Image (cartoon, rainbow, N blue to C red):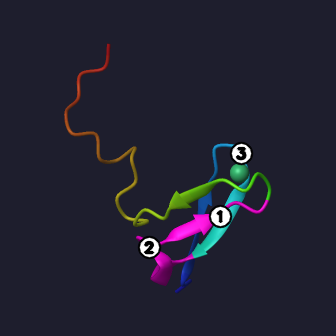
Amino acid sequence: MANTFKLKCKCGMKVLVPVAAVGKKAQCKRCGHQFVIPPPESSYESKTKGVPVQ
Ligand SMILES: [Zn+2]
């Protein structure tokens, strides 16, 4: 399948990154923000470790 996936930068820009670059740094082309690419599987939403929401 696709060897790339999309991340959303804090500025709202969708950044297309290669899966092979997980753990490495990517840079948003719009705002220049640098971030470490998280693995696509461990989406923050599905991994809510029972943290109470208050
Ligand atoms: Zn950005």
Count of all numbered marks drawn on residues in the image: 3
Measured from the top left, where is residue 4 in percent x and y?
57, 78
Badge 3 marks a residue whose secondary structure is: loop
Q: Of the two numbered discs 2 and 3 on the same chain, state the one appearing first in sequence.
A: 3
* CA separation in Å, label 3 and label 1: 13 Å
Q: Which mark is residue 48?
A: none
Dot 3, how many residues are within 10 Å of its Cα: few (below 14), some (14-19), or many (20+)? few
- Mark 3 residue CB less than 8 A from any atom of ligand 1: yes
- Rendered position, 28 above or below 24: above
- Residue 38 sits above or below residue 12 on the image: below
Circle 1 sits on which residue?
A: 27
Residue 6: x, y in percent?
61, 64
- Numbered range of the magenta stretch: 18-29
Q: Nearer the viewer, mark 1 or mark 2?
A: 1
For marks 1 and 2, the one nearer the N-term is: 2
Query: Horizontal and vertical percent for residue 29?
Result: 77, 63
Q: Amino acid at mark 3?
A: Gly
Alpha carbon separation for disc pair 1 and 2: 13 Å
Q: Which comes before the other along the chain, label 3 or label 1?
A: 3
Q: Which residue is mark 3?
A: 12
Q: Which mark is residue 22?
A: 2
Q: Three-letter amino acid code at disc 2? A: Val
Q: Residue at x 40, y 44 (%)?
A: 45
Asked whether disc 1 touches disc 2, contact meaning CB atoms under 8 Å apart, the reply is no
Q: Is residue 35 above or below residue 44?
A: below
Would residue 32 appear left or right of 41 to someone viewing this image? right
- Relative to 33, 18 lies left or right: left
For image coordinates 54% across by 57% down, the residue present is 35
Q: Secondary structure at mark 1?
A: strand
Q: Residue at x 47, y 83 (%)?
A: 20
